[in-house]
Image (cartoon, rainbow, N blue to C red):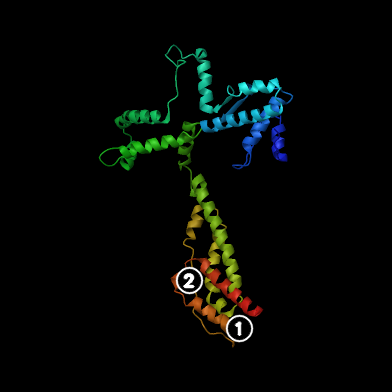
Amino acid sequence: MSVKLTESQQSVVNDRGGRLLVSAAAGSGKTKVLVERLFCRVLGEERADMDDFLIITYTRAAAAELRERIAQELSGRMADRPNDRHLQRQLMLVYQADIKTIDAFCTALLRENIHLMDFGGERGLTADFRVLDDNEATLLRRRVLPRVLEGFYTDMTPDRIQLADAFGFGRDDSRLEELVLELYNKVQSHAYPERWLEEQRTLWELEGVTDLAQTSWGALLLEDTLRQAEFCREQLCQALKLAEGDELLAMNYVPSLQATLDVLEKLCKVRSWDQAAALMPVPFPDAGKKRKRSVPISSLEEAQAALAGEWAALPGHLLWVSAWAAALMALAVWLFRRKLTEQ
């Protein structure tokens, strides 16, 4: 049964260069490519068997689905080549192939080689061991945790006292227990939980730090602040350019827009937390209230002025919620002028 593949998918199927990482979105055909790659080795020059491969999935359901897909593909190819003994053999081997989750593979590997494990004279695993399911593991952790906390309370250092006071208040320490369990579950997603916890602890050490931007989390916050400041600066530059095209807008809004823009330009150039804090808060001065022009205006300009007057009548705290208000007001006047000119 032939399957039409794209050029990039076919290159993955034919690749024999060693390690290969395929990254693609959901539903893009990764499973199809994997099945074709498998059959390319089974039916190609290698003439490999299905049980020669180790195929790891994330979940048991995915493993069962993949095995079923391979079996269906085998059946389809058997219909095209009913006398192929190699294919007939694969139809039996597909249900013995190692298509499973990583924990299922490790369990099988331990069970098959348990006799080779040396526990130093102590009692170790036996071949009939089994892996705890999630409910059993949770129950055991909740039974063991009170004993762990008893040891925690027997040697109270200042840091431990602070932790107990912060999270163990109330009639019992149930909140502290829940916090410990929650953190435990989260750190288990890392390959080396203890190493990761040690790395996180060092990130919060402030010895020798003179500015918060020197820390990883401070640098992240400063980077986000500067990115937002640059975006607002660009918007204000557009608003300022539009406002300068009209006499009343220029007199009423340009000074306040320029004051805000000056601070944002300085903010975009800072490189330390203290420099950024010194510029806060960013000023948003009130707009001017001048309504008369220096020269008479035409009927077209009078219509524009009426529209501008409606904007100026808005309460100051609504008009200057952010720089967006000035930008939208100036843009509306510009669009209105363009529409009247076209008419």
Residue type for callout 2: Leu
In the drawing, what numbered circle is on residue 300? 1
Q: Earlier in the sequence, mark 2 or mark 1?
A: 1
On the image, numbered disc 2 is attached to which residue? 319
Viewer can see residue 59? no
Q: Quadrant of the N terminus?
A: top right
Q: How far apart are labels 2 and 1 at the CA level?
A: 25 Å
Badge nearest the viewer, 2 or 1: 1
- Near mark 2 (Cα within 10 A), the count class, few <14, some 14-19 or many ≥20, is some
**Residue nearer the viewer, 161 or 294:** 294
Determine the residue positioned at 54% across, 79% down: 307
The quarter of the picture where the C terminus appears is bottom right
Q: Residue at x 57, y 75 (%)?
A: 333
For this rendering, which residue is in front, 251 or 59?
59
- In this view, 22 is above or below 214: above
Measured from the top left, where is residue 295 in percent x and y? 59, 87
Which residue, as the protein is rendered here, is positioned at the far bottom? 296
Instruction: Pick the residue in front: 226 or 99.
Output: 99
Query: What is the residue that sits farthest to the right in this orientation?
Result: 45
Tag 1's secondary structure? helix
What's the residue type where badge 1 is placed?
Leu
Tell me if 23 is positioned left or right of 59 in this view: right
Q: Position of residue 318 (x, y in %)?
A: 45, 70
At mark 2, the secondary structure is helix
Please name whichever residue, 328 or 196, is drawn nearer the observer in this view of the structure. Answer: 328
Q: Which mark is residue 224?
A: none
Crowding near the residue tagged with mark 1, few <14, some 14–19, many ≥20 C-alpha atoms within 10 Å: few
